[in-house]
Image: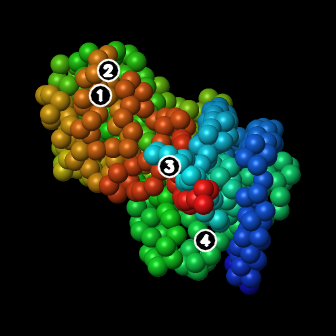
Amino acid sequence: MTETVKLKSPIDGSIYAERPVATDQAVNAAVERAKAAQEKWAQVPIVERGKYMLAMLEALVAMTDEIVPEIAWQMGRPVRYGGEFGGVKERTNYMVEIAEQALKSVPASNPKDGFRRYVKKDPLGVVMVIAPWNYPYLTAVNTIVPALMAGNAVILKHAAQTLLVGERFQQAFDKAGLPKGVFQNVVLNHAQTEKLLGSGKIDHVNFTGSVGGGRAIEKAAAGTFMTLGLELGGKDPAYVLPDAKMDHAVANLVDGAFYNSGQCCCGIERVYVHEKVYDEFVEGFIAETKNYVVGNPLEQATTMGPMAQARFADLIREQKAEALRKGAKAHINMKVADDKAGSPYLAPEVLTEVDHQMSVMREESFGPIVGIMKVRNDEEAIALMNDSAYGLTASIWTRDTEHAVAIGNRVETGTVFMNRCDYLDPALVWTGVKDTGKGAGLSAIGYDNLTRPKSFHLREAI
C-alpha cells in the first residue's frame, strides 16, 4: 500500500488533502536533477535569476483568491487577513534588489602590485528547505529566493499541515519558466528526510521548527559537513517603560501576542511592565484582548481561528491550568464554542500574578496566551528577559531611543525592537541565540550563509 501524508483541517477535522510520499527512487532522482540543474543555473547571470524570481512572485500573487481560503483550511488563519503576500513581496523584491551587490567578489583590503586577490562567493550547491506551517509562504521564501539568487538549486519539503503550499510554489516557478530541476517540491516522511540529510548529497539545510526538530536535523546531518540554518523555539519578551506611549504599546503588543492565534516565531509570549504604568497597561491590554472574535476562519467576522492542531491548543490549556494552580490570575475567560480538551479552538488568555516558576513564562507556548509581570526597574526587567533558553527577538517600549539601545545591548536576543514587535525586516539579518538556533537569513549576511568563499590569488606580473 502506498504511504500517504494526510492534512487534517483544524476547521472541522476533515482530511483536506492527501498526497503520496515520494519513493526512495523518486527522491534520488530529484537530487540528481537538482545537482545537474544547479551546475547550469550557477552560470545564469544574477540579473536573469532575479527576473525568474519576480515572475514567480507575480504568478504566486495571481493565485491569492485560491490561496487565502486554502491557508484557512490548512492551518486555521482567518481569511480576513488575506494571506502572507505583503511580506512575501517585500522580502522577494528586497533580496532580488541587493543580490548583485551582496554576491560581488570581495577584493583583498591590502592591494599588492602585480597581484589580483579577491574572494568569490560560490553557491553551495543543493539547498534543502524544510518549512513550517505557521507562516507557510513567508518562512519558505526567506530561504528559497536568496538560495536561488545565489545560484543554488532548492529542494522544498513543506510541513504536512501545509502540504499544498509546496505545490503552489512549484506551480509559480513552473509558470515563471524556471529551468527544470532548479526548484523541486517533494513530499517526504521523517525517515526519508533524515536519510536524505545523512546521504551527503545535500549541501545546506534550512529548517524552521521546534528545538527537538533542530536537534534531529543536526543528528541526521552529522558527519556530512553540510551547513545548517536552524530557527527553532522562542519565548519573545517585551518590556514596557514608564514613558511608553501607552495606547500604542497596548495595541501593538496585543496584536503581537495573539495574531495568527499566537503561532508566530517572533510573537510576544511574556510582557514585563514597569510598576509605574503596570495597572494602566494591564487594564488596556485586557480590554483590547476582549475584542477578539474566535470562530470559523472562513467567516469575515472571525479575528482568531483555531490553532493548527488540537494538541497545540491542549498545551496552552495545560500551561494555563498549571499557572492558575500556582497562583496566577486569568482575566479573559472568554466562552468559545468547542473550546475543550482535544479541540483546536481556543480563546485568548491574559495572565497576571505570574512568575518564572510557571511554564507559561519559561517554556514556548506558541499559542494565544501571555503572562504579564510587574517589574521595579531596568535591572529586573533585563534579568527576566534573559532568564530563558531562547532568544529570537525582544521589544522595548519607550520614547527614549538611547535608553532602548542601552537595554538592547544587554538582552540576549537576535533582534532588538523599539516600539514595535512581531516583524521581520529583510534588510536586517534574521538570527537567534541560545536554543533558538543558529545561522542567519535575509539581508546581505543571509547571502553569505548560502554561499561559500573561494579565494583567488593571481600573480599577474612574472
Spatial CA span between label 2 and label 1: 6 Å
Q: Position of residue 91 (x, y in %)?
A: 62, 38
- Residue 291 or residue 182, whichever sits in front: 182
- Residue marked by disc 3: 112
Q: Does residue 341 appear to the left or right of 331 in the view shown?
A: right
Disc nearer the start of the sequence (3/4): 3
* CA distance for labels 4 and 2: 44 Å
The answer to whether one can see residue 63 in this image is no
Q: CA distance from mark 3 to mark 4?
A: 38 Å
Find numbered disc 2 in the image and state the secondary structure of the residue it sits on.
helix
Q: CA separation, marks 4 and 1?
A: 40 Å
Tell me the SS state at disc 3: loop
Nearest the eye: 100 or 438: 100
> Which residue carries the number 1 mark?
405
Identify the residue at image location x=40%, y=18%: 248
Q: Which residue is mark 4?
A: 202
